[in-house]
Image (tube, helix red, strand yellow):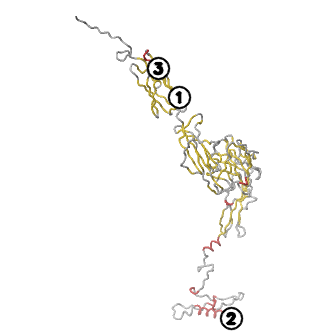
């Protein structure tokens, strides 16, 4: 049996060579393969399985006659296509982060791992909020094998048992009623974050209040207003007990009281009111705001475009370039809501801190755009109308008016005349005194014992001189120069003269002149 198998295989191989080469020995110089040793190489044990020989049409054709399918997974060299290669050697996985069971979708991370070792040893915890630790019970256990049916890694953060300095310690509930002696200012905030929002601002007894809505029962942890930081350790942080608790605000001016519900402003899941008393700080528009929440997520970070809307804010900036400008002061009485037709009528205030000021400029902003028309009318008022604009959070119409002043000229200089050695004919004698100042020259004419005040002087240095009449001389001007400023608005000067000449030509006394004459008869 063994011999028969060898014979059959030998005959088939010889036929395959002859057909496969296309009888290349005829007219071809290539060496013909001799099959003499082929029997030895093809020896089979009786125990080996005998396969059915291939049909002639299944024998491999030359390369140029092969039909290569587009769906073929390997190329001619036997290597994988690039797309197939990447797919076969790596696996993708996703890391999801949760804070207090709430998924933080903006933190989600994607990754890849080699398919021959699809083990994720560790993931990043750099985004863990202060006061939190890794919740190992809820988080996916690492190392983690990435499989096609399971490629999600969950990271859960939970509140740390150790108190952090930022964790609220004294946060009271909402007061039963909040009072205001200013308008209730609606706030406009342009942000992609619609879960935490500054809604209202108001003033009471000079202190600024902000009403802020937040989500998912997350108390305010820190507020930064205009660069000034306020921590929730302060009792000035108040939070509603539930999403349905209203914010009640009462005007001490009109006695109007109203309840406000947070769902009217944040139509999201479980919004709560927060009220922060920022103390004696100025309300400006626009202002910068940062709000950090316990547990992180949905925070307000670096927002610098929060504006008071549908309202008018009136500021007074009193100052002088020589003494340094002061911060603008909010005029609570004139600041409030625009009229129904979005118009306003306001006026400057010239007295501040017991001093009188002069108006030097007016800055007018409508919806943040500088207006050119900023002149007072005949009644001394500034009027205007704001054009309403549409925004992604509603309608916007606000005006910000800043009156700019400098100290009004209100210096005073008192000059007194003192003359010694007067004679009876000198009682109506006037002495002319000149005062040279930073913005002009003043002239005073005085008799002995008289005084005169020059008022409304600019602040600065003044020099006093006199034209001395005949028969008199100047004894002193005390002092010759004076400086007037806001701390020394009034000064006095005495100019002293004396009668000095009884001479022939300069003396006013009557003298009898006697001429002796010789007469000859």
Left or right of 248, for residue 86: left
Would residue 30 be seen by someone viewing this image from the given angle? yes
Closest to the camera, between mark 2 and mark 3, is 3
Q: Which corner quadrant of the image does residue 190 belong to?
A: bottom right
Quadrant of image for the N terminus: bottom right
Give the mark nearest the N terminus, 2 or 3.
2
Q: For this rendering, which residue is in front, 494 or 453? A: 453
Residue found farthest to the top: 521
- Helix, strand or loop status at disc 1: strand
Q: Residues within 10 Å of mark 2 (few under 14, many from 20)?
A: few
- Helix, strand or loop status at disc 3: loop
Q: Which corner quadrant of the image does residue 486 belong to?
A: top right
Q: Position of residue 293 (x, y in %)?
A: 70, 52
Q: For this rendering, which residue is in front, 206 or 79? A: 206
Would residue 324 be seen by someone viewing this image from the given angle? no
Q: Residues within 10 Å of mark 1 (few under 14, many from 20)?
A: some
Q: Is residue 389 above or below residue 38?
A: above
Closest to the camera, between mark 2 and mark 1, is 1
Quadrant of image for the C terminus: top left
- Helix, strand or loop status at disc 2: helix
Q: CA distance from mark 3 to mark 1?
A: 22 Å
Q: Position of residue 330 (x, y in %)?
A: 62, 42
Left or right of 347, for residue 131: right
Q: Which residue is mark 2?
A: 4
Residue found farthest to the left: 521
Badge 2 vs badge 3, beta-carbon distance below 8 Å: no
Q: Position of residue 508 (x, y in %)?
A: 38, 16
Q: Position of residue 242 (x, y in %)?
A: 77, 52
Q: Which corner quadrant of the image does residue 75 belong to?
A: bottom right
Residue 448 marker: 3
Q: Which residue is mark 1?
A: 490
- The residue drawn where x is 52% and y is 37% is 322
């Amino acid at each position: 049996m063994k011999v028969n198998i060898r014979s059959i295989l030998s005959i088939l191989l010889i036929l395959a060579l002859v057909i496969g080469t296309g009888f290349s020995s005829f007219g071809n110089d290539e060496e013909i393969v001799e099959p003499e040793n082929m029997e030895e190489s093809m020896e089979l044990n009786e125990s080996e399985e005998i396969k059915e020989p291939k049909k002639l049409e299944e024998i491999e054709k030359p390369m140029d006659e092969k039909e290569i399918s587009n769906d073929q997974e390997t190329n001619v060299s036997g290597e994988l296509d690039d797309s197939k290669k990447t797919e076969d050697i790596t696996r993708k996985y996703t890391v999801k982060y949760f804070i207090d069971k709430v998924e933080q979708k903006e933190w989600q991370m994607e990754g890849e791992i080699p398919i021959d070792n699809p083990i994720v040893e560790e993931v990043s915890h750099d985004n863990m909020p202060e006061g939190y630790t890794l919740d190992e019970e809820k988080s996916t256990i690492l190392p983690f094998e990435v499989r096609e049916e399971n490629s999600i890694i969950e990271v859960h953060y939970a509140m740390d048992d150790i108190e952090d300095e930022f964790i609220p310690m004294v946060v009271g509930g909402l007061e039963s009623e909040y009072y205001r002696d200013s308008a209730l200012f609606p706030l406009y905030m342009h942000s992609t974050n619609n879960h935490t929002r500054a809604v209202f601002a108001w003033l009471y007894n000079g202190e600024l209040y902000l009403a802020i809505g937040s989500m998912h029962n997350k108390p305010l942890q820190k507020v930064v207003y205009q660069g000034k930081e306020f921590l929730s350790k302060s009792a000035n942080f108040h939070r509603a007990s539930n999403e349905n608790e209203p914010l009640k605000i009462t005007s001490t001016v009109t006695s109007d009281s109203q309840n406000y519900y947070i769902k009217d402003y944040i139509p999201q899941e479980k919004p709560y009111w927060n009220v922060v008393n920022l103390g004696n700080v100025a309300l400006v528009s626009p202002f910068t705001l940062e709000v950090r929440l316990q547990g992180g997520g949905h925070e307000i970070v670096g927002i610098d475009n929060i504006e008071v809307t549908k309202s008018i804010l009136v500021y007074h900036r009193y100052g002088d370039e020589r003494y340094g400008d002061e911060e603008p002061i909010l005029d609570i009485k004139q600041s409030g809501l625009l009229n129904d037709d979005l118009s306003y009528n306001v006026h400057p205030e010239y007295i501040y801190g017991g001093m009188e000021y002069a108006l030097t400029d007016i800055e007018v902003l409508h919806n943040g755009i500088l207006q050119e028309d900023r002149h007072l009318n005949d009644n001394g008022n500034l009027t205007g109308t704001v054009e309403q604009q549409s925004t992604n959070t509603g309608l916007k119409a606000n005006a910000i008016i800043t009156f700019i002043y400098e100290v009004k000229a209100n210096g005073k200089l008192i000059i007194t005349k003192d003359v010694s050695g007067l004679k009876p004919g000198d009682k109506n004698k006037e002495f002319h005194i000149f005062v040279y100042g930073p913005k002009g020259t003043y002239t005073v004419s005085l008799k002995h014992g008289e005084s005169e005040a020059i008022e409304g002087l600019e602040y600065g240095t003044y020099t006093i001189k006199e034209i001395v009449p005949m028969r008199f001389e100047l004894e002193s001007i005390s002092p010759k120069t004076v400086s007037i400023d806001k701390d020394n608005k009034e000064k006095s000067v005495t100019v002293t003269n004396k009668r000095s000449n009884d001479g022939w030509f300069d003396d006013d006394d009557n003298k009898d002149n006697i001429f002796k004459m010789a007469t000859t008869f």
